[in-house]
Image (spheres, helix red, strand yellow):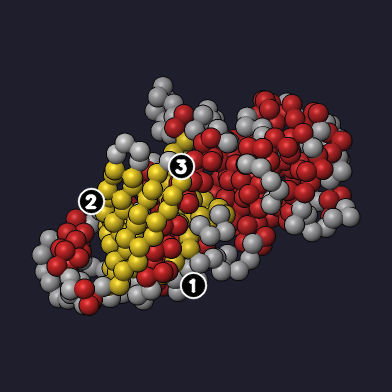
Amino acid sequence: MDAIFEEEVPRARLCLLLRHFSELKDDRDPWRVAFPLKEVMLLVTCATIASCDDFDDIVAWGEHHLDFLRQFSEFHFGIPCERWLRSLMNRLDPDLFGRCFASWVAELWPGRHDFIAIDGKTARRTHDQRKGLKALHTLSAYATTARLVLAQLSVPEKTNEITAIPDLLDHLAETKQLEGAMVTIDAMGCQVEIADKIVAYKADYLLALKGNQPTLEADVEDYFRTAPASELVEKTSVEKGHGRIETRTYSASSNVDWIVSERSYPGQPRFKSIETILKVHARVEYPNRCSFDTRFYISSAPLNIERLASAARGHWGVESMHWLLDVEFKDDLSRYRAGHGAKNMAVVRRFALNLVRANKAKGSIKTRRKRAGWSPEFLLEILRL
């Protein structure tokens, strides 16, 4: 690490990255280590930013940019082969790897985030039917305004999101990313325990209602069907683009006393912190058709239609991030299966996306990644603060 911190650019993001990843344990005998862990992380990080989406590409990029890498570390034995690199990434502890990533993000982008969306994504081709392995499912916390992945956890399958979300909230609280934010989660995360944990960390929630809370959803829908206009606050937004016109009507009410009243029947609501309920009706006009969608939400935040609308609308940003990972980083095409390689490389892709997005150069994510691969000077711009 000394060779890096003695460089003329001590505030480089790379220095912070390697400082946090120094927490990773290297169980190899020191006298047998030809490729130190910090050099491997430097290689994988830089190559992933520079449009390399598999280990063969990473090794080839490293061999062609060895002089650039040696500005930061010795690389006495050059670049490891693809098989060795894959083996090491398979051995790293993915939980510790993810925590290092989260603490690195918190130091690079300190301060409170207004909206945090939590959602999961499946890397579809990481399954192995012969061995009975299911595809890797990754749960991410995404700051929708800053367009930044704050933390992530790998879960065995989608149904385990419910048990993984509290752990992800604990990570966000430890890095001081959660207090004061509004957390948005889809219907799967609409659970009493999750809502209580968010409130306990001095944050607010906006939880979608759907099949897993059928009674509460039906009650809220009935309320909005018959509610007097005096109890509702409304807002309408119109967005045009991508060959369509989308009109969203937001209706919110703070009349929620009836939700927490004493009732006893199967499926009764048990949420104790609801302050506001929200209805979002979306009409999307295409050249040849129209589509309609209505969704209902509960929130612990006081009635503020602008904030509620921004949170509900902003939740799509995590889906946009997932789309970028699939299209630009080939996340869905990844075939990593053995060991922890799939989980660890999923972490690398997300913080590479953070760095590329944080750079304000012109061009798409794809263009900036390719430019980083062509130009070491531009790659250094991305890595610097």
Q: Of the two numbered discs 2 and 1 on the same chain, state the one appearing first in sequence.
A: 1
Residue behind mark 1: 180
Marks 3 and 2 close (CB-CB < 8 Å): no
Q: Residue at x 50, y 71 (%)?
A: 179
Mark 2 Cα shell of 10 Å, populated few (<14), some (14-19), many (≥20): few
Residue behind mark 2: 211
- Asked if residue 56 shows in the view, the reply is yes
Q: Position of residue 260 (x, y in %)?
A: 21, 74
Q: Residue at x 69, y 51 (%)?
A: 359
Q: Nearer the viewer, residue 290 or 100?
A: 290
Q: Residue at x 32, y 60 (%)?
A: 249
Q: Residue at x 76, y 43 (%)?
A: 379
Q: Of the two numbered discs 3 and 2 on the same chain, state the one appearing first in sequence.
A: 2
- The local secondary structure at tag 2 comes to loop
- Asked if residue 30 shows in the view, the reply is no
Q: Position of residue 313 (x, y in %)?
A: 41, 57
Q: Position of residue 375 (x, y in %)?
A: 79, 37
Above or below — where is 41 with respect to 119?
Answer: above
Residue behind mark 3: 242
Of the two numbered discs 1 and 3 in the rendering, the one whose residue sits closer to the viewer: 3
Q: Of the two numbered discs 1 and 3 on the same chain, state the one appearing first in sequence.
A: 1
- The local secondary structure at tag 3 comes to loop
- The local secondary structure at tag 1 comes to loop
Q: Nearer the viewer, residue 35 or 186?
A: 186
Q: Amino acid at mark 1?
A: Gly
Q: Nearer the viewer, residue 34 or 213?
A: 213
Q: Quadrant of residue 94 in the image?
A: top right
View extreme (front): residue: 287
Of the two numbered discs 3 and 2 in the rendering, the one whose residue sits closer to the viewer: 3
Horizontal relation, residue 302 to residue 95: left or right: left
